Amino acid sequence: MIGSSHVFMTTSEIADPSVPRRAKGDGATSVRLFPQIVSVLREEILRGVFPVGTQLPAENALAARFKVSRHTIREALRELRGDGLIASRQGSGSVVEGAPTDQSYVQEVGSINDLIHQAPSVIFRVDSSKIITASEQLAQELDIPAASRWLQMQGFRYVKEGDAAPTCWTEIFVHPDYAGVARIQGRTPRAVYELIEDLYAVKVNLVDQQLSGQPMPAELVGPLGVSKTATAINILRKYFLTSGKIIEVARTLYPAERFRYSMRISRKLHKNVRLSV
């Protein structure tokens, strides 16, 4: 689409100098044409107009062909490199790479909060807070070192303040270097990892999440108001700093009938990231 006129330009129309357009160098026009330039070049690569191992035309030639600036062409080539369709080689310009043999399904997550997918109003009421030493069994369950020390916080989560019935049960383990977070937890609905970031000026770089099913523990049947044969969905999350250090491990048990997990998957040409579903 181009501007508000919603006129789609075909490959030949973009390449044809006779097509009316604003003067060369018009930045607004270059921005409008950018997605179509990428689309045209991608299509030509996949159709074999530019075979694998050959060079794309030089930036000057592409800029003249599409009547846009070299800057716009560079941005288009950068996107094609991101798709894995071309590579930049010193002295050779942009060389066509082999197109991916299949299409990957990529989960789109805009932020860690998108992954957690928890409304800000959800209340975590801590019923127990103490320093513990990880037993062999706990270390195996959480994939942490045995005999390591952690701040353990346990409690139920409620949809909103004042609710009598909890929606799920949560257990959080915080690395002892950040145990001071216990002093401010509960004063705000923000996630524990966010409080750690603010209090200690660190940044979570990676979250590992695993989902599994299990029988609901007997001690949670009554408080959660479920049957003795209820199934629980166990969500285990580990929070890492850029250095690779784990600062938090959290696990939450939801009654299966109250749990819903949704994700958006886009089909993209991609070489490295794959999501198996």
Image (cartoon, rainbow, N blue to C red):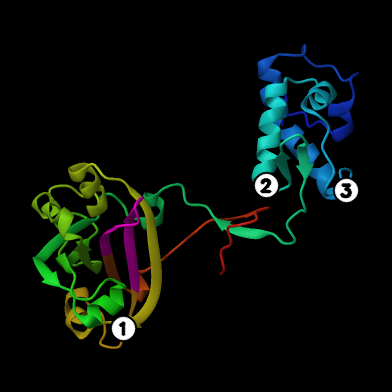
Mark yes or no: residue 21 visible.
Answer: yes
Q: Which residues are magenta?
A: 234-249
Indicate whether 167 appears above or below 264: below
Amino acid type of the residue that numbered disc 2 sits on in the rendered structure:
Asp
Picture quarter with the N terminus: top right
Indicate whether 139 appears above or below 215: above
Decide which of 152, 10 is in the foreground and name it: 152
Residue at the spot 76% in from the left edge and 32% down from the top edge? 37
Q: Secondary structure at mark 1?
A: loop
Amino acid type of the residue that numbered disc 1 sits on in the rendered structure:
Ala
Amino acid type of the residue that numbered disc 3 sits on in the rendered structure:
Gly
Left/right placement of residue 235 relative to residue 274 reads left
Q: Give coordinates of residue 47: x percent, y percent.
A: 86, 48
> Which residue is under mark 1?
230
Q: Say which quarter of the image contains residue 218.
A: bottom left
Dot placed on the residue nearer the N-terminal end, 1 or 3? 3
Q: Secondary structure at mark 2?
A: loop
Say if the magenta span includes residue 243: yes
Outermost residue toward the bottom?
229
Residue at the spot 82% in from the left edge and 49% down from the top edge? 46
Q: Give coordinates of residue 121: x percent, y percent.
A: 25, 50
Which label number is shown at residue 83? 2
> Which residue is under mark 3?
48
Q: In this rendering, which labeled residue sits more in front, label 1 or label 3?
A: 3
Please rate how many residues cluster around mark 3, counting C-alpha atoms within 10 Å: few if below 14, some from 14 to 19, many from 20. Answer: few
